[in-house]
């Protein structure tokens, strides 16, 4: 498998480049005894149960784990509420502590203490009840990065309504598909959000989407963009957030929910078909997000914690909302772009708010590298003490840049591997214990067991070849199923290697046992740390009406990790002009969202296929990357590929 990825990867990793915890860090770290791994391994259920004691339960569980492969139930018999654990239990001793420090793109500031946040959440939970929502009903949320977004999540959780957050960059079609799959009754959105000074027309998009969603009864609209957004409110259906909140009572006891009550659905791309509704439940998810936030970031009571992800993705769910707030942390939230008004915005924020923990993505770090060191150098970053990354493999060069120019060599870097499906961090350093190696996510979190296996499911020894990354036992924050599609849950994740969870990632263990994740081995791309199924982009291309057939592959990109290259066969009579190329790119962006816009479109009279008519993606990847062609003897028409390659070369970089 993935041999081409493996070779470049070997050059990048240097096992002699070891970074022990910076001087003094281990001594002050809340976890600094390596024994923790052995202890957790000896009895992983006992380990999780011990830490589950630090959640607040209405009723304690009877059974830690029921495991009927691949169906898991954690802490059955227990009664708990995520919103209660993130808010109410902090009121007595942290009521006046800042829960959210929010900064708008134009520099506006808004803060909420835990007491204030609790009141807003209770009020909004009552609003949702007033709209007729009952425990179990789904709520769709399509917003920008405003404080009302975590408020909406925590209010839904409070009354036991699973939320389905749809990233604000997604198109109306993507939104309506997700609403329909979840059959959400209420959609929460805003008039518009801000990105690089311009308005993202969320309400207009929502109007488009809701035309096709029979389940939606009401649309709640937050006013954020005001006069800058052109919106219309539909009488009876659309309601202003501020109108509803005016008379809402701040008294709303949290529902006592089963441990396995569905907390949320979050859609993510797969290899085929529509996006998968990943289902997370309450107690186990809360436990693992809480514990990983505390240990991986060495979270202390006085930290100012900033995760730069959007709450539209799982990172924001787990590491802006549930994990940090279950710990009673102070979370910074920034609405806008990192280069608005200038390329030093992040560092300006770090300095002004004295951010101590920063969690961001390799794609951002590479962008900062490209912009140059002058931007971080303009600011005092000495408050920072832990740095994290997530979303894709971090190349050692970016790691070292992050270490030198942001951490100034004194902040450990935690490269955290996990997935929407895993719900929480799975492979990661613990900053007071682990010696890090740039490019490696190091070792499984205590209680987690991973392996690299070959095609036959046989374990591969450390230091040997790359293989498939699997997880060997259940973990509390694991997803429980795919919404409406339990068969796909079994098929996609639990059938390739029976009894084990298959991550979809290729990885390798270094001689010392450290894991280095290479990337996806399936037809899923990772663009800027976001998953996009090749199939989704192909369908969007075909949907344009001009395309007979399309095949999408990933190419390497210095900033985004992977970029999308589309090989397109046009219908007879349609010409492969530059205008057509732009039109198709535009169409994909409109269908799915700007994140899925192909970087390259290569027109071809035919696509290279095997004799069994399977598109040869590997070959297309080579063509798109301009690599030498491999063995083409299984091609039905070898001439096609050479033609493809020629066209590709003529196009040059073909932006
Ligand atoms: C895929 C999951 C988990 C939140 C963000 C993405 C890749 C994630 C790392 C890392 C190498 C990583 C994997 C994984 N990935 N973190 N530290 N090193 N690769 O969530 O959209 O569910 O994507 O992101 O390929 O399978 P996601």
Image (spheres, helix red, strand yellow):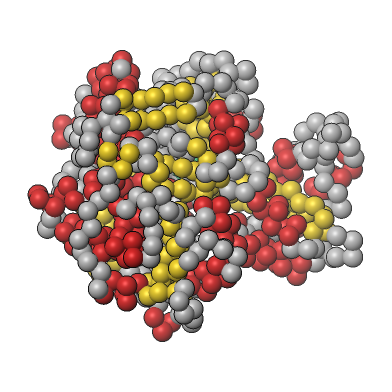
Viewer-proximal residue, 637 or 367? Answer: 637
Relative to 655, residue 357 above or below: above
User: Quarter holding the N terminus?
Assistant: top right
Relative to 470, residue 599 above or below: below
Percent of width and height locating residue 307: 33, 51
Percent of width and height locating residue 312: 44, 55
Q: Can you see residue 583? A: yes
Q: Residue furthest left?
A: 93
- Is 96 left or right of 226, judged from the image as shown? left
Residue 348, picture quadrant:
bottom left
| Residue shown at the point (27%, 24%) measured from the top left | 47
| Residue shown at the point (44%, 54%) measured from the top left | 138
- Is 12 left or right of 496, judged from the image as shown? left
Percent of width and height locating residue 481: 50, 37
Residue 386, picture quadrant:
top left
Percent of width and height locating residue 23: 20, 34
- Is 170 left or right of 615, judged from the image as shown? left
């Amino acid at each position: 498998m993935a041999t081409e990825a493996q070779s470049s990867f070997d050059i990048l990793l240097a096992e002699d480049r070891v970074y022990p915890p910076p001087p003094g860090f281990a001594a002050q770290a809340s976890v600094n005894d390596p024994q923790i791994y052995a202890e957790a391994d000896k009895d992983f259920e006992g380990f999780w149960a011990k830490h589950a004691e630090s959640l607040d339960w209405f009723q304690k569980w009877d059974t830690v784990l029921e495991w009927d492969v691949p169906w898991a139930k954690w802490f059955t018999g227990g009664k708990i509420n995520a919103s209660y654990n993130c808010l109410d239990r902090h009121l007595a001793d942290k009521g006046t502590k800042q829960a959210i420090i929010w900064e708008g793109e134009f520099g506006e500031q808004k803060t909420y203490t835990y007491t204030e946040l609790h009141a807003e959440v209770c009020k909004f939970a009552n609003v949702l009840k007033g709209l007729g929502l009952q425990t179990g009903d789904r709520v769709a949320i399509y917003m920008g990065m405003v404080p009302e977004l975590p408020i909406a999540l925590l209010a839904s959780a409070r009354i036991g309504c699973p939320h389905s957050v749809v990233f604000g960059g997604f198109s109306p079609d993507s939104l309506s598909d997700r609403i329909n799959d979840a059959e959400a009754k209420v959609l929460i959105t805003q008039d518009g959000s801000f990105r690089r000074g311009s308005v993202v027309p969320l309400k207009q998009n929502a109007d488009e989407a809701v035309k096709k969603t029979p389940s939606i009864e009401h649309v709640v609209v937050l006013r954020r963009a005001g006069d800058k957004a052109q919106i219309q409110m539909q009488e009876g259906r659309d309601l202003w957030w501020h109108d509803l909140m005016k008379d809402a009572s701040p008294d709303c006891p949290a529902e006592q929910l089963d441990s396995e009550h569905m907390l949320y659905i979050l859609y993510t791309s797969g290899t085929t078909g529509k996006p998968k509704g990943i289902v997370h439940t309450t107690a186990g998810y809360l436990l693992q997000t809480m514990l990983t936030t505390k240990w991986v970031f060495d979270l202390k009571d006085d930290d100012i914690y900033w995760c730069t992800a959007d709450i539209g993705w799982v990172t924001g769910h787990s590491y802006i909302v549930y994990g940090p707030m279950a710990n009673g942390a102070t979370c910074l939230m920034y609405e806008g772009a990192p280069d608005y008004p200038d390329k030093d915005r992040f560092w300006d924020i770090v300095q002004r708010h004295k951010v101590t923990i920063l969690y961001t993505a390799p794609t951002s770090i590479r962008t900062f590298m490209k912009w140059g060191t002058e931007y971080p150098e303009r600011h005092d970053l000495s408050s920072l003490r832990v740095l994290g990354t997530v979303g894709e493999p971090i190349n050692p060069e970016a790691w070292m840049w992050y270490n030198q120019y942001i951490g100034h060599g004194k902040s450990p870097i935690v490269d955290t591997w996990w997935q929407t499906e895993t719900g929480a961090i799975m492979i990661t350093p613990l900053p007071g214990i682990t010696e890090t190696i740039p490019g490696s996510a190091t070792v499984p979190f205590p209680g987690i067991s991973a392996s690299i296996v070959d095609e036959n499911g046989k374990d591969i020894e450390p230091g040997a070849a790359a293989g498939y990354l699997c997880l060997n036992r259940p973990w509390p924050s694991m997803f429980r199923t795919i919404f409406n599609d339990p068969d796909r849950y079994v098929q996609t994740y639990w059938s390739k290697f029976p009894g084990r969870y298959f991550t979809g990632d290729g990885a390798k263990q270094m001689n010392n046992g450290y894991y280095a994740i290479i990337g996806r081995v399936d037809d899923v791309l990772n663009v800027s740390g976001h998953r996009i199924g090749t199939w989704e982009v192909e369908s969007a291309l075909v949907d344009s009406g001009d395309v007979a057939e399309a095949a999408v592959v990933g190419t390497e990109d210095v900033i985004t990790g992977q970029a999308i290259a589309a090989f397109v066969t046009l219908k007879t009579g349609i010409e492969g002009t530059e205008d057509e190329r732009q039109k198709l790119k535009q169409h994909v962006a409109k269908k799915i969202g700007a994140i899925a816009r192909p970087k390259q479109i290569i027109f071809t009279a035919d696509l290279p296929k095997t004799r069994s008519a399977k598109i040869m993606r590997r070959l297309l990847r080579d063509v798109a990357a301009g690599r030498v062609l491999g063995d083409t003897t299984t091609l039905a028409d070898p001439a096609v590929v050479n033609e493809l390659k020629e066209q590709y070369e003529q196009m040059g970089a073909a932006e």
